[in-house]
Image (cartoon, rainbow, N blue to C red):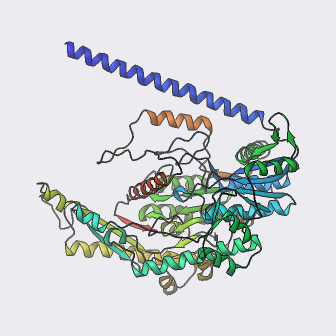
Amino acid sequence: MRFFLKSVAANLVAIFITFFVLAMVGVVGMVIFVKVAASAGHHENTTHAKSILVFDMDVAITDAPEHGGPGLSLGLGGLSGSGTPRLTVYEVVNALDQAAKDDKIAALYLSGSLDTDNAASGYAALREVRQAIERFKASGKKVYAYLDEPTVKDYYLASAANTISLNPFGTLSINGLAAESFYLRDALAKYGVGVQVTRVGKYKSYVEMFTENHMSDADREQLTLLLGGIWDNVAGDLATSRKLDVVAVKKLANEPGVFLAKDALKNKLVDNLAYLDEIIGTLEDVGAYDEDNDTFYQVALSTYADRMESKRILATKSAFKSGDQIAVVYAEGEIVDGGGGADNIGGDDLSSTLREIRGDKDVKAVVLRVNSPGGSVLASEVIQREIRRLRDEKKPVVVSMGTYAASGGYWISTYSDYIFAEPTTVTGSIGVFGLKFNIKDIANEHGVAFDGVKTAPFADLDTMTRPWNPDEQKLAQTLVDNIYDSFIGKVAEGRKLPADKVNEIAQGRVWTGADAKNLGLVDALGGLGDAIKKAEELGKLKGKPWHIEEYPEKQSPLETVLQALAQNGQPPPVSRLGLNLNATVTGHDPVSTSVRELQTQWNFIRTFNDPRGMYVRLPYLLNF
């Protein structure tokens, strides 16, 4: 009885503590929400004349807005997985375009370093932002950039400025692009894990991660050409902005690639060397002086973006209570079977959203923003089916490809009415593979054996306790061949191309958006704004009032808090190794960065949930 009473008392204490902690989190969350709401209301019309718009580049620029779902990493204020703020391409571009027309905004100031985790801040997204900066300059307003230790991506974005200043003790990198994969063949063999693969496509190299310990010749060929094509576009943009010859830019990238401040100035990569206080002094001369804060009047781009979004929502509610719409649907992340989560595309979730849009009489056209390396075959087909149904209902679908629209990302795009890609978009990868793991050897080494019965030869085809026999391997290959043939047929029909030509340019090979345009895989080069204009045209909305509805909707601060409360009651998923698979590693130091990259790869592998084990997926996670 004594032990029983002690157990009850302990449980009561644990319950009390749990409810107390949840209550405190709820109170803090509500306080944060009230403060955010009050702040939004207070600052609605407080932009001072001659204010400087401050773009802190220490941000993850993504395609889709932060939204709820399983696996969401809590980020009050829109934080990315690495703990830095998160803004969408649409938010940044819209804010810059509005600021260009805002008489109270005198100039734009950029500083900081981009967060590139999980494919954030890809070159396709950055090109759209650069174009918005160029439009801001074209309005007659100046753009100033201040850099300390810029990466290639930081410099690529900042190079659009009128004036670039570099810290005298800083360095500047324009040392080209690199990408690498990791290989597990020897590790799997060491621990007794067997792997068998089926694939179609000479360049469909993802399976080589498990079967090789180095890059194949075919993969090296396609990756070299892919990076070369992207670098050509990046170097070309840098040369144009800095008024340099593109050959000279490439030469600087080769020799030496990383520049001391004085050498960066000498080679006209920056305009001057200065410390931060000197830049602040310059901006104080440009903008109005804020005596209360002893500096120039300023507004953060994130705050300005929220303000513009609030005005857009208010205008929409007042003027378009039942007006015509263009639905902008975000498909960002790996494509997985089922519901999916915050960082991937669930086939069921996205198809449900598309069905909802199909039944909405106010939606006259759809823009599908794809930023995905692909994934599950079944989920990709479920999504594509809804795209075809939209077209059947005479609702045009325009695809805007972001950093990636490869394999499954291309599968869901191919039946759209029109496809835009950026020159640096990674697309194509029309190929299929399957994976089969088995733990027979490692189990046997530890004294574990398996045996059983079955009613048909292929009843245990999916078992992990033994490898496939020749007949099973042949069957699996037949399934993969069939999916590949279907993929080819879908692209040929959707893109109105001969099947032989599609097969020739398929083979699992990845292409840049510029190459894809020449091959007929996309219709035009352009960004999200271009896709929206095309949807306006195809939806016959020109000259009519209409507005944009985004799917999924961005989370409000209150929804973020409630999401956190819902998750706090659940223990984090734990692997068989006892690792918290959802733990977030923060920091920008080399060790944290490396750990995050491994975590990203591991989380990606966990998205392999196709019922048949068949995937249309980019061969690697490229983080240039």
Note whether 501 is above or below 37 in the view shown. below
Q: State which quadrant residue 295 falls in.
A: top right
Note whether 407 is above or below 170 in the view shown.
below
Which quarter of the picture shows residue 32?
top right
Residue 148 vertical position relative to residue 492 in the rendered view, above or below: above
Would you say residue 414 is visible in this rendering? no
Q: Position of residue 169 (x, y in %)?
A: 66, 57
Q: Can residue 50 be seen in this view?
A: yes
Q: In this view, does 76 lie to the left or right of 605?
A: right
Question: Where is residue 262 shown, x and y percent of the image?
Answer: 70, 65
Which of the image's four quarters has the N terminus?
top left
- Hey, which quadrant is residue 580 in on the image? top left
Q: Is residue 339 above or below residue 380?
A: above
Residue 198 appears at what percent x and percent y?
A: 32, 73
**Is residue 550 toward the left or the right of residue 321 in the image?**
left
Residue 329 or 68: which is nearer the viewer?
68
What quarter of the picture does the C terminus occupy? bottom right
Q: Which of 431 and 357 is in front in this view?
A: 431
- At x 61%, y 37%, the residue is 557
**Residue at 21 percent of width and 16 percent of height:** 3
Residue 469, percent from left and from top: 19, 72
